[in-house]
Image: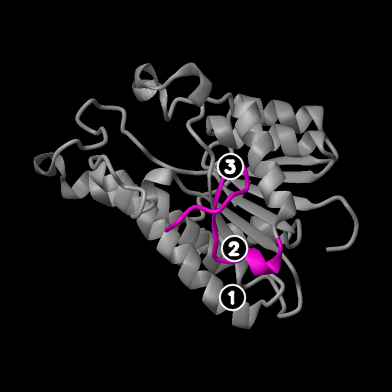
Amino acid sequence: MAGDKKKVWVIGANGGLGLALCRHILSQGHQVTAMSRQPAAELQQLQGDYPRQALAIACDINRQDAEGLAAVSDIFGQYGSPDWIINASGLLHGKHTDNMPEKRLSQINGSFLADNIQANTYTSIAVAQYLETLYKRDEPFRFLCLSAMVGSISDNRSGGWYSYRMSKAALNMFVKTLSIEWQRRFPLACVAAIHPGTTDTPLSVPFQNNISSDKLYTPQLSAERIYRVLSALAPEDSGKFFHWDGSEIEW
């Protein structure tokens, strides 16, 4: 990737962490395409604040019908291939109290499990499927997926949170498996997962009473940490699962 300024795609840019990532990456001088189903006012404001760097677009990369994929291709095709891609989308709980992380086996239901898999696993698959149509073999790029420590099977000591744990573990397996395929197809690329830590966003609000203040991070701090890890990635890091401090996490 020539030069210091990168073209960066942030998927799930409407979320608290996604928005913070857009802000921080823009502050570093990079170009950001912020993608969400319906760009919030904050994203529109960023576009106004950084008219030559920021672009907020409405799209749903999960759409698999021909019309939907064509629309996504038309939008992305205008701006060229990105150097860095971050998937910041995800699901932990629903709007209703019955759609919360399960504490017991009896609380698992197929609908909420499917929602978790769709949001936390399949979105990264859909992004990767689109990305691999953009590059030639010798082109470098980095694809970073936001995972979670609870997706680590070896780190699971407390149980619970079935659907979320399973969907993040599935994401981790996807990242590892994809890295093997892309090592052959795109040897200069890197695909990795990262645990950002518990961040003070709407995703974590229902659980913050159980988190000590020194373990609840601001979106800005988490964005800075993720950016630091992303900036340091190299092809030999492909297929790894990172903590926000850059250390590796066991699968």
Which residue occupies the foreground of this view, 137 or 238? 238
Instruction: From the image, give the main secondary structure of the stretch colored magenta.
Output: loop
Q: What stretch is highlighted in magenta?
A: 234-251
Task: Report which residue position mark 3 lands on.
Answer: 244
Q: Mark 1 and 2 residues: CB-CB less than 8 Å, in contact?
A: yes
Q: How far apart are marks 3 and 2 (CA)?
A: 16 Å
Q: Which amino acid does label 1 sit on?
A: Trp
Q: Which of marks 3 and 2 is in front?
A: 3
Q: Is residue 94 magenta?
A: no
State the SS at label 3.
loop
Q: Which residue is drawn at 59% across and 63% down?
A: 191
Q: How crowded is mark 3: few (under 14 residues within 10 Å), some or many (20 or more)?
A: many
Which residue occupies the foreground of this view, 235 or 204? 235
Sequence order check, earlier mark of 3 and 1: 1
Q: What residue type is labelled 3?
A: Trp
Spot occupied by residue 5 in the image (x, y as percentages of width and height): 86, 50
| Residue 94 horizontal side relative to residue 13, left or right | left
| Residue 138 horizontal side relative to residue 211, left or right | right
Q: Is residue 21 visible?
A: no
Q: Quadrant of residue 79?
A: bottom right
Q: Residue at x 25, y 48 (%)?
A: 113
Task: Report which residue position mark 2 lands on.
Answer: 191
Sequence order check, earlier mark of 3 and 2: 2
Q: Residue at x 31, y 28 (%)?
A: 95
| Residue 8 horizontal side relative to residue 36, left or right | right
Q: Quadrant of residue 207?
A: top left
Q: What residue type is labelled 2?
A: Val
Whether 222 is drawn above or below 189: the answer is above
Task: Report which residue position mark 1 lands on.
Answer: 182
Spot occupied by residue 220 in the image (x, y as percentages of width and height): 65, 27
Q: Which residue is drawn at 50% across and 50% down?
A: 60
Q: Quadrant of residue 244?
A: top right
